[in-house]
């Protein structure tokens, strides 16, 4: 169940659908997306969909201490997902690896306030490929 506002992890590069290799031929990678729109298309013999959203960068901060980024923002233990450049991306449902539970937060620093999404989920992208 994917809804607007969810953070998802999805495969990019090359992946398999029903044993058939699809994608652009590059090595598989995990990317993250803040879902903006879910489009579903039904036809007489199949269904397909696309997920559109904002490309996210993850700041992995799973050490036991609270730390700060280069702008002085306080980052607590867990993963922080940040919209870096407002790139709009799309993926198909077969690319989705998981929905990551997050809470919306702001990273405040002396230079900038950034909307971000914090998660304490123990998600390791290497295990998912």
Image (cartoon, grey):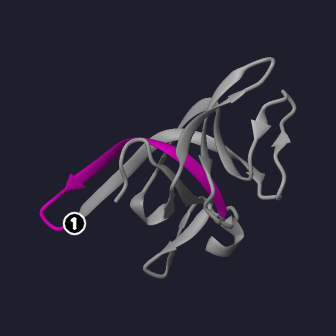
The image position of residue 3, as x and y in percent, is 35, 48
The image position of residue 119, as x and y in percent, is 61, 52
In this view, the residue farthest toward the bottom is 19
The image position of residue 66, as x and y in percent, is 82, 46
- Residue 70 found in image quarter: top right
| Image quadrant occupied by the C terminus | bottom right
Q: Residue 128 or 41: which is nearer the viewer?
A: 128
The image position of residue 128, as x and y in percent, is 62, 72
Report if residue 44 lies within the magenta region. Answer: yes
Please report the residue visible at 50 percent of the width from the left and 63 percent of the height from the top: 98
Q: Residues within 10 Å of mark 1 (few under 14, many from 20)?
A: few
Please report the residue visible at 76 percent of the width from the left and 41 percent of the height from the top: 75
- At mark 1, the secondary structure is loop
| Image quadrant occupied by the N terminus | bottom left
- Find the magenta span and give its range: 29-45
Please report the residue visible at 84 percent of the width from the left and 38 percent of the height from the top: 68
In the image, residue 119 sits, relative to residue 89, either above or below, namely below
Please report the residue visible at 54 percent of the width from the left and 59 percent of the height from the top: 10
- Residue 117 found in image quarter: top right
- In the rendered structure, the answer to whether residue 11 lies left or right of residue 43 reads right
In the image, residue 32 sits, relative to residue 108, either above or below, namely below
Q: Main secondary structure of the magenta part?
A: strand
């Amino acid at each position: 169940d994917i809804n607007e506002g969810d953070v998802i992890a999805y495969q990019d590069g090359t992946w398999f659908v029903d044993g058939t290799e699809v994608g652009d031929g590059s090595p598989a990678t995990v990317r993250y997306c803040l879902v903006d729109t879910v489009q579903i298309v039904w036809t007489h013999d199949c269904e397909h969909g696309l997920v559109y959203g904002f490309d996210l960068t993850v700041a992995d901060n799973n050490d036991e201490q609270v730390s700060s980024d280069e702008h002085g923002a306080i980052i607590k233990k867990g993963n922080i997902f940040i919209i870096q450049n407002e790139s709009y991306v799309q993926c198909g449902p077969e690319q989705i690896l998981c929905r990551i539970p997050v809470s919306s937060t702001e990273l405040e620093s002396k230079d900038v306030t950034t909307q971000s999404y914090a998660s304490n989920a123990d998600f390791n992208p290497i295990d998912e490929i």
